[in-house]
Image (cartoon, rainbow, N blue to C red):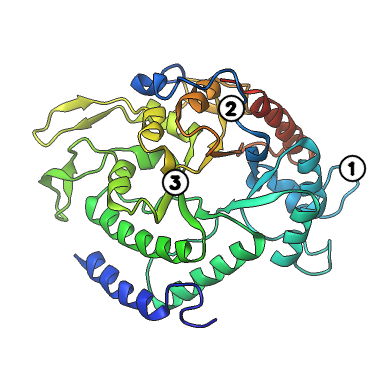
Amino acid sequence: MSDSQHGMSRRRILGAFAGVAGAAAAGAAGFGSAAVANSKGNGNGVLVPPGKRGIILYSVRDRISAAPDTSGVPYGFERVLGRLAEIGYKEVEFAGYTQHTSILGRQITPTEIRKILDDNGLRANGSHASIPSTVTPNTIAAFEQTLDTAEILGMQHIGTGSDPTSSNYKADWDAAADRWNLFGEMARARGLKLYTHNHDAAYNFLLDSGPLDGLGRPTRSSGIRKLEYFFDKTEADRVFFEMDIYWAHVAQHRFRAYTDPDGNLQTDVFDPLATVATRTMRFPLFHAKDGAFNPNVAAGYEMVPLGQGDIDYGNFFANMGAKGYHNPMWEQDNAPGGAADPGRSLRYAEVSYQHMSGLRG
């Protein structure tokens, strides 16, 4: 690959690396005020168009990775993707590119996966790949390989399944923003949107003020949430987001108060819908994961197939804005049934697809 083949040369990237390195050194029912946002003009139409109905393969990882068996349940990419296409899914988000080597006598290649997608009328539209946590010549080269694979598979988006940083501190989120702006520019130069997938912790409050602890770190918050800070620190045309709607509701349940700079406890209930509706074009992807409300568990919810929980997906998709732009991917972490029920994850995939396709607003 030449230095400038994809519009951003290694020299430019490494120059940006120097700047990044320098910066690094330095409730189940309510959606709040955004519940009525963009509600006009939606009529009673389909909320998730057929071509936008997707699945992340993590939900059926047990069957992607399964060796040939006598259960009668599909296994490996060719059979599982074929079954998902029969159900009606059109988009696929990857969570790895490997299957059991006994199927082919070796590992499958991205080019072979692309052919399976094409043969079944499926489109790869994202991946929980590895986004480097540092910027070095080696990590830049590794990320270029990640982008190469995304191009082979025909993706429009490339991302990761983890937060930009697990830190609670402003300085670490500043450094993460610099990295993500850099990698986001690399992705954009290849016609891809770089996205981060987030769990509940990203919506906790940023520690950015108040007395310092023994290590010189802030101990209180101005009230801004970590990911909300990251929204403003990253470039809107380089860095995008995949809200996991289930985990956003867990955050609504868990992170409801913070200690302000003066030491007073302040209440602020997180609103997942408002977070999207006010910046809707930065959320091309979602994880459509349902949860049954249970106040007796720490998360406040327990994962269930889409449509069997308490998260109001009809209201959410009807009022988040830019109807038809978003790409929801069904996910359920606990879908696999193990040896006792090897077909469960694909059954749940069908149940969840039927609910997604039936949403109207």
Labels 1 and 2: the sequence-earlier one: 2
Nearest to the observer: residue 118 or residue 303: 118
Q: Residue at x 39, y 26 (%)?
A: 253
**Amino acid, disc 2:** Leu
Q: Residue at x 19, y 26 (%)?
A: 266
Q: Look at mark 2 in the image and give the residue it sits on.
A: 47
Label 3–label 2 contact, CB within 8 A: no
Q: Look at mark 1 in the image and give the residue it sits on.
A: 72
Question: Whole-percent x and y of residue 59?
Answer: 65, 42
Question: Whole-percent x and y of residue 332?
Answer: 61, 36
Left or right: 206 with respect to 342?
left
Q: Residue at x 67, y 25 (%)?
A: 355
Question: Whole-percent x and y of residue 58?
Answer: 64, 46
Q: Residue at x 76, y 42 (%)?
A: 84
Neighbor class of circle 1 (other Cα within 10 Å; few <14, some 14-19, many 20+) is few
Labels 3 and 1: the sequence-earlier one: 1
**Amino acid, disc 3:** Phe
Whole-Å distance between the Cαs marked 3 and 2? 20 Å
Tell which residue pokes out farthest to the front in this image: 41
Q: Secondary structure at mark 1?
A: loop
Q: Secondary structure at mark 2?
A: loop
Q: Secondary structure at mark 3?
A: strand
**Amino acid, disc 1:** Gly
Q: Look at mark 3 in the image and give the residue it sits on.
A: 241
Whole-Å distance between the Cαs marked 3 and 1? 37 Å
Left or right: 347 with respect to 146?
right
